[in-house]
Amino acid sequence: MLTAEVIQELSAVVGAKHVMDSAEDLIIYSNDATMFHSRPEAVVQPGNRDEVVQIVKIAGRHNLPVTCRGAGTCLSGGPIPLKGGIVLEMTRMNRILKVDAVNKVAVVEPGVITFSLASAANQVGLLYPPDPSSMKESTLGGNISECAGGPKGVKYGITRNFVLGVEAVLADGTIVKTGNEVDGDMAGPDWTMLFTGSEGTLGVIVSITLRLVPIPPVKKTLMAVYDRLEDAAKTVSVTMASGIIPTTLEIMDNLSIVSVENYLKIGLPVQAGGLLLIEVDGVQSTVEEDADHVSEICKKCGASEVKMAQNAAEAEELWLARRSINPAFGQVAPCKFAEDATVPRSLVPVLVGRVLEVQKKYDVPIFICGHAGDGNMHPTIMFDKRNKDQKERAEKALHDVHIITLELGGTLSGEHGIGFAKAPYLRAETGEIGYKLGQEIKRSVDPHGLLNPGKIFFYEGVLH
């Protein structure tokens, strides 16, 4: 239990104004972007690495759980403090320590907003490609911890492809550095990847070294409109099999199109069964050729219209539609299961078809959108939890979506993480041995289970 004496110890480290324990503060920090919640006993905002070390040591002495948190945009319950204790709120550690244009690396603190780094890189002619929809709100520490993706993942890869190294505070307060600024480090196993996607269960990340790439000189944005969503899904696999790697290949179904149009009023084709938002980038000659080739593929797969943005403003309007999906969904129903079911690209049409069957089976709206180009789909189940029958049907639909994803050889999470929301199904993906290995790794670096307990391999509910 967190006592007044512990509050005094924590205040002595970070200052009293950065330790919060009022009922209002604890309620605010009890949830993330899911509908779940669990209150901490205190919220502490460290300003630097050494303060994190002292806080973790205090927590260890008093056997208090420590759960890290960035901006709270997580969609799997990762930053929810299931066991109470301390929420370590990292947004004060928000400095971009270095952007090195020659070696194409950046060094940042975990509280830096993703968009801030992307903007700083752009100023020196470089690109930080990972671009989750929450990039203007989410922090890089959260992105690394959940291994976020985004539309550009189809060509450039997701967050893990850009993390060169981290500095982390372990559960006993010691500090470990993994990786370095060398792109191609082969000194032993990839320790950095052990922390990437570990959701704060292995250590508190206090510094991150990231790889940057040159900005492509030219890009073109296209929107392909379909009468049938299945034809849009088929276009994804045909495009990827053609040898062209688009920068982005995003899919939206009719429910998504209509909800975004109702939200933005920008003239989206509300009669369409589905649409694809496609971007290609590179040098001028290649981009022109790829855009024409992709346009032909869309038409052969059944697109009724292919519109090419004529300027940056038109392209931005198309992307605004994609980025507005989440706020638009909020106008449809008060609750949602926002999944990131990810399957091999060739099976995107199969996943779409089976999700449509689930929607019909349980009579619950499932909005289908996502980063189809790398198989990272976002079937989003909408419901009102105050309606018991509707909530139960939504939960059954969610179960089926998880099982279908695994049956297709996919993964439970393409970018949202496991947290505890998807932890009941993790053993079904990893297998018994893989699940136990995950537990053993956690115990080896956090034997008392103080860092983000109850998550991933230590979920305490029923396992499938």
Image: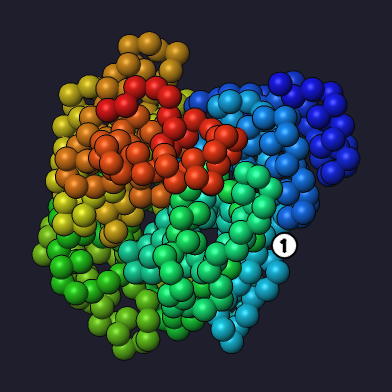
Q: Quadrant of residue 57?
A: top right
Total tally of numbered discs in the picture: 1
Quadrant including the N terminus: top right
Which residue, given by chain and number where applicable, does mark 1 sit on? 95
Asked whether, in this view, residue 19 is left or right of residue 352, the answer is right
Q: Is residue 228 above or below residue 421?
A: below
Asked whether, in this view, residue 288 is left or right of residue 197, the answer is left
Residue lying furthest top: 388
Where is residue 380? Give x, y as percent.
Answer: 35, 36
Residue 106 visible here:
yes
Instruction: Give the camera-side residue of 91 and 285.
Output: 91
Where is residue 225? Give x, y as percent.
Answer: 24, 55
Instruction: Give the camera-side residue of 39 and 319.
Output: 39
Instruction: Give the camera-side residue of 457 and 67.
Output: 457
Q: Residue at the spot x=51%, y=26% of the render?
A: 36
Q: Is residue 308 above or below residue 329?
A: below
Q: Amino acid at mark 1?
A: Arg
Residue 272 visible here:
no
Judged from the image, the secondary structure of the residue bearing numbered disc 1 is: loop
Where is residue 140? Give x, y as percent.
Answer: 58, 56
Q: Residue at the spot x=44%, y=32% of the render?
A: 458
Q: Residue at the spot x=15%, y=68% of the render?
A: 241
